[in-house]
Amino acid sequence: MKRDALQRRVWVEIDLGGLRANYRRIAAAVKPAKVLCVLKANAYGLGVEPYASALARTGCVGFGVAEPHEALQLLPFGKPVQILSSVLPDEVAPMVEAGVTLPVIDVPTAKLIDAAAKRAGRRAKVHFKLDTGMGRLGILAADAPRVIREVVKSCPHLDCEGIFSHCPTAYDPADTFADDQIALFKAILKDVAKDGITFRKVHIAASDAINNFPAAKRAPFNIVRTGINLHGSFDPNGRRVLKLESVLTLKTRVAQVRLLPAGTTLGYGRTWCLAKPTKVATISAGYADGLPLALTNRGHVLINGVPCPVIGRISMDYTTVDASKAGDVKPGDEVIALGGKGKYAITPDDWALLKGTHAYDIICSFGNRVERVYR
C-alpha cells in the first residue's frame, strides 16, 4: 500500500476563499494604500505556493519575504517580491539578477547592490530600511538623511523606489511609541525632500499598526504589510477593527475511547485525577503537531461539535479529553482541535492567550507530519 493512500492522523484545512476574503477586507480598510502580502517562513508554515497562487489573483502590490530562497520561490507568481530584512554580501548578485527588491540597511550594502546591478546591466529596485526604534536592522534614524543622500548620489544603478520601517509595539494602542516612530519617519521624508528625494512606496504599518494606528496607513504612507491578519488572527493585546475570519481548522482523529474509573490519574506527572467514572477519549495529536502544552487541563477540543476539556498533560503524540458530553464517540472519529464555528469555535488567538504568546507562534508550530489541505 502506498503511504499517500493512508489518511493522515492530523491535518490542517486552509480556506483559500477565506484567505482572499480577508485580503479584500484589509484592502478596503487601508484604501487608497496598497497591500503587500507577507508570506515569509513558508507562509508561516502553511504552504507558500497555495497562498501565493490564491493571493496573486487579488490586487496585492507584491509579496514580502525574509530571505532569498523564499524570494525565488515566489517569483513565478508574477508579483514583485521584496526581501524585508537584510541581504548578505554573497546573496546580492543572485538577487539582483533575479529582479528581487532589496533592502538597503547601510551604505556598504547599497554599494554592493549598485555594483551587482552595473554588472548585470540593469537598475536594481531597493527600499531604504529605517530603524526608527525596532533596534534590529536598518539605518539608524539619526543617520538616515545623510545615508539616503549619499546612496542616491553615489549609486546610479539603484532604483530607490521605496522606504520603510517597522514598529515593535504597534500591538498596543495605548503605547505612544509607534506614534513617535511615525513622526520621526515623516521628519526624515521631509528632510530628504529638500534635495528632491522622494519615494514611490512608503510603508511602516504591518498587521498590528493597520488595526491600532490609523496614521500608519494614511499619506505619506501608501503601502501596508500584512501577514497574520491574512490568516484571520490578531495580536491578543490590540484592537480588532478589521472583521476577519480565521482560515485554519486543525483536525485529528480519536485513537481510543474508554470509561475510566474514579481515581484514575492521566498523563505525565499525573496532573489530573478523575473525580468520577469518566468517558475519556485519547486523540491522535500532541505538542509535536502544534497543540500547546499550555492547553494542559485548560483547553478543549470539539468532538461532534461538543467542547471536550483537555484533561491530563498533553503528550508529544496524544492528548486525553473528557468526552462525556459528546455522545457516541468511537476510534477514527474526527476531532477539531483548532477551528469550528459558533460560540465554541477555537481560534489561534485563543491558544495564544492560554500560552501567553501570539498567533504567529501558534501557526508556525504545526509539525511537519501535519498535512496541509487547501479548500
Image (cartoon, rainbow, N blue to C red):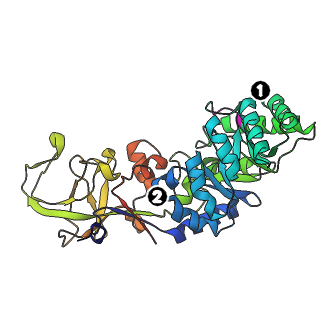
Magenta segment: 130-134
Image quarter (top left, top right, bottom left or bottom right) of the N terminus? bottom left
Q: Could you tell me which secondary element the residue under label 2 belongs to?
A: loop
Crowding near the residue tagged with mark 1, few <14, some 14–19, many ≥20 C-alpha atoms within 10 Å: few
Name the residue beneath numbered marker 2: 46
Image point (30%, 60%), residue name: 301
Image point (67%, 50%), residue name: 82
Q: Could you tell me which secondary element the residue under label 1 belongs to?
A: loop
Query: Residue 10 at what x, y percent from top left?
Result: 31, 61
- Residue 26, by quadrant, is bottom right
Query: Residue 275 at what x, y percent from top left?
Result: 12, 51
Q: Amino acid at mark 2?
A: Leu
Which of the two residues, 345 or 368, is positioned nearer the viewer here? 368
Relative height, residue 160 to residue 11 (above, below): above
Image point (42%, 47%), residue name: 353
Q: Amino acid at mark 1?
A: Ala
Relative height, residue 16 to residue 317 (above, below): below
Distance between the Cα atoms at labels 1 and 2? 39 Å
- Residue 153, by quadrant, is top right
> Magenta: predominant secondary structure element?
loop
Name the residue beneath numbered marker 1: 142
Query: Residue 13 at what x, y percent from top left?
Result: 41, 66
Relative height, residue 254 to residue 188 (above, below): below
Crowding near the residue tagged with mark 2, few <14, some 14–19, many ≥20 C-alpha atoms within 10 Å: many
**In the image: residue 4, left or right of residue 222:** left
**In the image: residue 90, left or right of residue 50:** right
